[in-house]
Image (cartoon, rainbow, N blue to C red):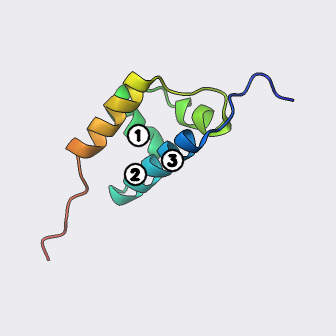
Amino acid sequence: MKSENFPITAVMEQLIADVEAYAASVDRKPQAVLRDAIGAGWKEWESWKAGKSSPTMARVDRLRDYMAENPPREDAA
């Protein structure tokens, strides 16, 4: 039993999936998105994915606001 890790909940799994999808859509790494959105350290993303830490709701709100305010650019083809 790994008591130092948080259980990965469905909500956290969804957040990770949303960040990964957003990052891919803007051609950036998830770590870079977190750094720009919430000032996260470079290892924070891996810590979230490993279940070693999780964001506060305030940070999740800021992250989701950032993604909504900075949508992927549509090609002007």
Is residue 7 visible to the viewer in this orientation of the structure?
Answer: yes
Measure the alpha-carbon separation of dots 1 and 2. 8 Å
Three-letter code for the amino acid on which mark 3 is drawn? Gln
Residue 61 or 71: which is nearer the viewer? 61
Q: Residues within 10 Å of mark 1 (few under 14, many from 20)?
A: some
Earlier-in-chain disc, 1 versus 3 = 3
> Quick check: 41 left or right of 71?
right
Q: Around disc 2, counting alpha carbons within 10 Å, would you say few (fewer than 14), some (14 to 19), or many (20 or more)?
A: some
Q: Residue at x 66, y 33 (%)?
A: 51
Query: In this image, 13 relative to 20: left or right?
Result: right
The extreme front residue here reads 10
Q: Earlier in the sequence, mark 1 or mark 2?
A: 2
Identity of the residue furthest to the right in this view: 1
* Residue 20 shown left or right of residue 51 in the figure: left
Q: Nearer the viewer, mark 2 or mark 3?
A: 3
Badge 3 crowding class, 10 Å Cα cut-off, few under 14, some 14 to 19, many 20 or more, is few
Q: Which residue is mark 1?
A: 32
Amino acid type, label 1: Ala
